[in-house]
């Protein structure tokens, strides 16, 4: 065997939570598994991990942390047609980025291919598996349906020695792909369709990313997964509810081989998030069809995409904790995830000013040759985050939405003839608007009150506070305004999910930002005051080319 039986015991954690932890506590109290807890996270390296995987990661590694127990990272790499080193690397990065550590070296189902083959021979020798030469279409047709029992294969009762010789010849590469398969001999009338003599091995001449061309037969997932758990002495094999129907086969395989240990499969509800899809097939289609800019496009529900968009590991872990663990499938509203991100970023990131739709302001009574260095707090409530310098000059930029020729009293920004405070600076009054040939405001001529730095004007009430940047010292930045990728709550239910793609999921603009943003390293998160949370792009941002991604708006813009 590739694994040796562990001897260490695990201390029970007393934190009361969900039904899975209650089961673990019960097993520990009864002395099962020698008092051990050992979990695993077993993704297939055939795509990037998504938000649904994040829930499973947090559950499996979280239980390991709480019970001071090991958690393995294992790649279930049984389908070389769809697996790649890129996917394997991305999975490792995602788990580490979320803040978890796996036990020992990374495991692979392919590490156990020799063991799996030997267990298959064991089943043949026990009369519990046979080589079937029916075409795949006949195997599927003869399996029956939920109302009709299946039909036994004409090869089902072939002699054990014959099946064993054929299986060895399959391994030796003597037959063509698809010419025959190895099937378990269970019950063709079983009410669970998966138990109707499931296929255990098939012939596939494919290059494997780890074993190369050593094998031309590959085990099926249901046969591999339970045995891998057993070899690794996993105690609790946690998986999502769609695998509940697979549990009888999981148990049957382990009950009928000389399994080194007896893990228990427990199912929990998967994470279904509104306005997104988590089907790997459909996510792959989005990438292959160029609907998104790769697996880590910030609109994708992948962990890599959420990272590039600016989500924090803690916000994703907090979200998964808020969703909880249950036995009932449900759909989680996107606002729960977005609120988790806002709540984390609100307390942890510095503030900056950025003008996303700039119009120029000329302060006519401010000396042309004068410049000041003002001071702004990096966080309005956390003094420990310090301050930054803000260059103030005669010419500034403010946001176009912060000026109107006339407005009612509810409008708390700049109105012609009215006053407003510039954040961390002076009170200004709008005197004149210069229009372009289309009647749009090209620039504003304003005056400032030099006695209002750090204090209110005497006898006058200022409408509100707006953000700004110095026209001389501001830096131009490319800002990507991301929104939800789909504009319907359940795009996966549509005949063509592409029809639900949100045409406004990405808008690219040129903005003017504080000069300090140019000093930020990639993956630096900010709150742009009054605009939202943004991050410098993980790959493309640098001091000479400022590129920022909007993580999330300050408040939910979909529900008002």
Image (tube, rainbow, N blue to C red):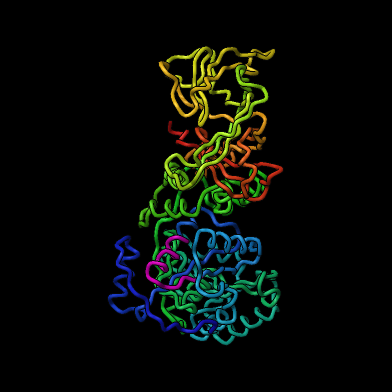
> Which residue: 51% across, 16% down?
415
**Relative to residue 108, is residue 95 depicted above or below?**
above
Residue 76, percent from left and from top: 56, 68
In the image, 40 versus 404, the foreground residue is: 404
In the image, 41 versus 130, the foreground residue is: 41
Q: Main secondary structure of the magenta part?
A: helix
Residue 504, percent from left and from top: 58, 34
Query: Which span is picked out in magenta?
Result: 57-72
> Which residue: 47% across, 82% down?
257
Magenta stretch: includes residue 503? no
Residue 230, percent from left and from top: 46, 77
Can the viewer see residue 36 in this picture?
A: yes
Residue 47, percent from left and from top: 60, 58
In the image, 344 versus 384, the foreground residue is: 384
**Relative to residue 48, is residue 32 depicted above or below?**
below
**Relative to residue 304, is residue 88 depicted above or below?**
below
């Amino acid at each position: 065997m590739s694994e040796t039986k562990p001897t260490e015991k695990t201390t029970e954690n007393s934190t009361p939570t969900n039904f899975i932890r209650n089961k673990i506590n019960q097993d520990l109290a009864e002395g099962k598994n020698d008092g051990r807890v050992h979990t695993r996270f077993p993704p297939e390296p055939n795509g990037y991990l998504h938000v649904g995987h994040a829930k499973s990661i947090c559950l499996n590694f979280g239980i390991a942390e709480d019970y001071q127990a090991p958690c393995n990272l294992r790649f279930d790499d049984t389908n070389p047609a769809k697996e790649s080193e890129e996917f394997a690397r991305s999975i490792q990065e995602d788990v580490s980025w979320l803040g978890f550590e796996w036990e020992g070296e990374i495991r692979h189902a392919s590490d156990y291919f020799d063991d799996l083959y030997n267990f298959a021979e064991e089943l043949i020798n026990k009369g519990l598996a046979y080589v079937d030469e029916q075409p795949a279409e006949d195997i599927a047709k003869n399996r029956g349906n939920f109302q009709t029992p299946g039909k036994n294969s004409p090869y089902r009762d072939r002699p054990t020695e014959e099946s064993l010789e054929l299986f060895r010849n399959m391994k030796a590469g003597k037959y063509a792909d698809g010419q025959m398969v190895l099937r378990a001999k269970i019950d063709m009338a079983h009410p669970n369709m998966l138990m109707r003599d499931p296929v255990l091995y098939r012939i596939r001449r494919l290059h494997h990313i780890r074993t190369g061309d050593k094998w031309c037969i590959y085990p099926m997932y249901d046969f591999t997964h339970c045995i891998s758990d057993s070899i690794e002495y996993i105690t609790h094999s946690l998986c999502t509810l769609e695998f509940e129907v697979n549990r009888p086969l999981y148990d049957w395989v382990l009950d009928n081989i000389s399994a080194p240990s007896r893990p228990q499969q427990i199912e929990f509800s998967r994470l279904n998030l509104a306005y997104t899809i988590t089907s790997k097939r459909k996510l792959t289609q989005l990438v292959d069809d160029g609907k998104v800019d790769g697996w880590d496009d910030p609109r994708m529900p992948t962990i890599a995409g959420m990272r590039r968009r600016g989500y924090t590991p803690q916000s994703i872990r907090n979200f998964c904790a808020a969703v909880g663990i249950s036995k009932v499938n449900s759909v989680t509203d996107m606002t729960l995830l977005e609120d988790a991100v806002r709540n984390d970023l609100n307390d942890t990131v510095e503030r900056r000013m950025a003008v996303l739709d700039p119009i120029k302001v000329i302060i006519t009574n401010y000396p042309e040759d004068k410049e000041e260095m003002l001071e702004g707090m990096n966080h309005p409530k956390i003094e420990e985050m310090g301050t930054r310098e803000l260059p103030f000059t005669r010419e500034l930029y403010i946001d176009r939405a912060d000026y109107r020729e006339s407005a009612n009293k509810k409008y708390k920004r700049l109105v012609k003839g009215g006053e407003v405070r510039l954040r961390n600076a002076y009170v200004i009054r709008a005197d004149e608007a210069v229009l372009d040939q289309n009647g749009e405001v090209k620039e504003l001529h304003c005056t400032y009150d030099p006695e209002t730095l750090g204090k209110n004007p005497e006898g006058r009430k200022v409408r509100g506070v707006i953000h700004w940047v110095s026209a001389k010292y501001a830096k131009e930045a490319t800002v990507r305004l991301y929104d939800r990728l789909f504009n319907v709550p359940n795009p996966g239910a549509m005949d063509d999910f592409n029809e639900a793609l949100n045409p406004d999921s990405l808008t690219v603009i040129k903005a003017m930002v504080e000069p300090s943003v140019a000093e930020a390293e990639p993956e630096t998160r900010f709150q742009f005051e009054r605009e939202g949370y943004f991050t410098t792009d993980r790959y493309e941002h640098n001091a000479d080319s400022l590129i920022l991604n909007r993580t999330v708006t300050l408040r939910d813009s979909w529900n008002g």
